[in-house]
Image (cartoon, grey):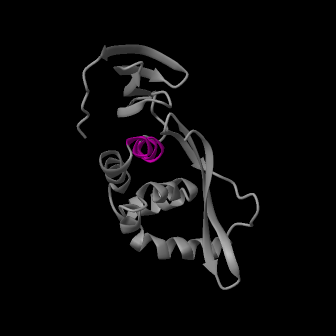
Amino acid sequence: MDGTYTVTYLLPEPSGLKYAGGAEVSLSGGRFVSVAAAEPRWEASLGTVERKAWLYRLIGPARELLVSDTSAVDNAFLLSAVPELMSRLSIRYHGFAEQYSKYLISNVDSSIGNLIRRNFVGKGRSLCEDEQFDVFVCQVNHQAVSLCLDDRDGLKRLEYRFGRKNNIELKLSKKSTQNMTILS
């Protein structure tokens, strides 16, 4: 299942369905490689007051909704469709973004967990390529350190990168045929 798909979230309201948000999701080789907010194409979005009220109602049960075993991957897209939801959840539940990405990586799908981590925990600092898994990312002054893992041609590759997005100053890699286990 490769390609780009749009996930749309609609809210039932007395006047009909209203657009709450959408996410555009891309898959390659059966792995999620990108997820981003999608602009509404056919429905006006909720008004500011309605959206705030909806977010307020959603914050309480959101933590349980997002970790439901039946639709955890689908629910993860809600965070990209409505980006302010993650910031509100992180304020209410300290460390939510990191805990949630770890839940997805270990229980559901590592590639969507990695995207959540990259978008909400890493804050866009990762130097890893889209198809790589971010093992570790941190900021040092105005530069980033990333430890990236990927699987190409049956070989696992662990790569250390240091620098800036447009100027990687140091790149070290190690290939192995053995399984590499990532502990989080």
Q: Quadrant of residue 2?
A: top right
Q: Spot the residue most to the front.
A: 1
Q: Nearer the viewer, residue 72 or 30?
A: 30
Q: Residue at the spot x=48%, y=44% of the render?
A: 119
Residue 53 drawn at (x, y percent): 56, 76
In this rendering, the answer to whether 93 lies above or below 157 is below
Residue range highlighted in magenta? 110-121
Q: Position of residue 124 (x, y in %)?
A: 49, 38
- Left or right: residue 107 versus residue 50 is left
Q: Residue at x 42, y 41 (%)?
A: 111
Measuring from the top left, give residue 24's x and y in whole percent. 61, 49
Q: Is residue 164 depicted above or below 81 in this figure? A: above
23 left or right of 163 in image? right
Q: Is residue 112 located in the magenta-colored stretch of the structure?
A: yes
Front position in the image: 49 or 129:
129
137 part of magenta stretch: no
